[in-house]
Amino acid sequence: MYLPATNLAENSFCPQDILRILNNEEAAISNTKLSYHLKEMRNANILNLEREGKRYFYSVNHDTLNDMVDWVRSIQQN
């Protein structure tokens, strides 16, 4: 696992970690596709990005995730 050197990226994953996890789950994806999806999730404010030098670390944006959960709950109640 690639560990961040600072607290800014604490509890985050780098793309290599994400690829390793996906490969272990037999959900292989190319670097290109992963990069595209990470970018789209950042643009949708689902993921946060922290940079440490040349390395990138991604974490879930909990505010957005909570909003999504609230939205799903509201649909279930209807």
Image (tube, helix red, strand yellow):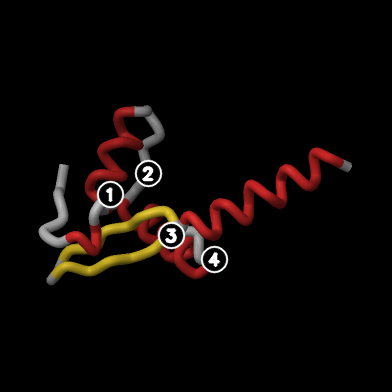
Q: How far is mark 2 from mark 1, CA to CA?
A: 23 Å
Q: Earlier in the sequence, mark 1 or mark 4?
A: 1
- To which residue does mark 2 refer? 29
* Mark 1: few/some/many CA within 10 Å (<14, 14-19, 20+): few
Label 3–label 2 contact, CB within 8 A = no
Q: Which mark is nearer the camera, 3 or 2?
A: 3
- To which residue does mark 1 refer? 11
Label 1–label 4 contact, CB within 8 A = no
Q: Which mark is nearer the camera, 4 or 2?
A: 4
Left or right: 73 in relation to 54: right
- To which residue does mark 3 refer? 47
- To which residue does mark 4 refer? 44
- Give, as a three-letter code, the residue at label 1: Asn
Q: How far is mark 4 from mark 3, CA to CA?
A: 8 Å
* Residue drawn at the location 31% of the way across and 45% of the way down: 18
**Numbered disc 2: secondary structure:** loop
Q: Earlier in the sequence, mark 4 or mark 2?
A: 2
Q: How far is mark 4 from mark 2, CA to CA?
A: 21 Å
Q: Earlier in the sequence, mark 2 or mark 1?
A: 1
Looking at the image, is 18 positioned above or below residue 27?
Answer: below
Q: Where does the image place residue 78, in percent across and percent down from the top left?
A: 88, 42
**Numbered disc 3: secondary structure:** strand
* Mark 4: few/some/many CA within 10 Å (<14, 14-19, 20+): few
Report which quarter residue 76 is drawn in.
top right
- Give, as a three-letter code, the residue at label 2: Ile
Looking at the image, is 71 positioned above or below residue 56?
Answer: above
